[in-house]
Image: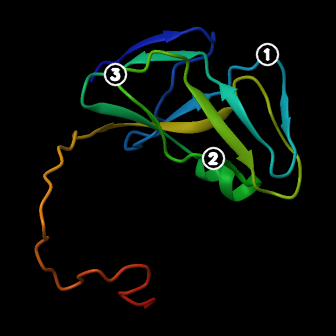
Amino acid sequence: MKIKVINKSGLELPKYQTPCAAGMDIYADIPESVTFKSLERKLVPTGLFIELPQGYEAQIRPRSGLAIKNGITVLNTPGTIDADYRGEIGVILVNLSDREFTIERGDRIAQMVIAKHECAEWEEVNELADTERGNGGFGSTSVK
């Protein structure tokens, strides 16, 4: 699938790091380093503007290495970029660790997954079909 992109960052375009990767790494387009204090969140620009086909979204997800090693994650994960959005892609990062963390221009800060989606149309009814689970939720299938 081809997706139109404007890249104002001067950095490389998002790319898959391995042949079977679902997510493309995206980079911080910042003029100078940015330090996150513990529990601090910031919007990090990418310099990317995209035009997705109708019926698709781009999901912004954390990078597992940043999360496990440094406590850095995407706050509204997954962040959704709708097909009709034309603004710059920004990534809301948060530092969940107890120490400061600094990102530099060009650092890989998140990953982007392109996904097909359906648009739902509601049909109001008076009852729903029975299932074995029924209305059991939040732990109703047990822990083990």
> On residue 22, which mark appears?
none
Lower position in the chain sequence, tag 1 or tag 3: 1
State the quadrant of the N terminus: top left
Check disc 2 and give the amino acid type.
Leu
Residue 139 x/y as whole percent: 43, 84
Q: How is the image coloured?
A: rainbow
Q: Could you say which is closer to the camera, residue 29 or residue 43?
A: 43
Check disc 1 and give the amino acid type.
Pro
Marks 2, 1: nearer the viewer: 2
Check disc 3 and give the amino acid type.
Leu
Which residue is located at x 85 percent, y 51 percent? 38
Distance (Cα) linking label 2 and label 1: 22 Å
Q: Is residue 121 left or right of residue 58?
A: left
> On residue 31, which mark appears?
1
Q: Tell me whether the residue at label 2 lies in contact with that at label 1, contact meaning CB atoms closer than 8 angstroms.
A: no
Residue at the disc numbered 2: 75
Which residue is located at x 25 percent, y 24 percent? 54
Image-quadrant location for residue 58: top left
Residue 142 x/y as whole percent: 41, 90
Lower position in the chain sequence, tag 3 or tag 2: 3
Distance (Cα) linking label 3 and label 2: 23 Å
State the quadrant of the C terminus: bottom left
**Circle 3 residues within 10 Å: few <14, some 14–19, many ≥20:** many
> On residue 52, which mark appears?
3
Q: Could you say which is closer to the camera, residue 69 or residue 55?
A: 55
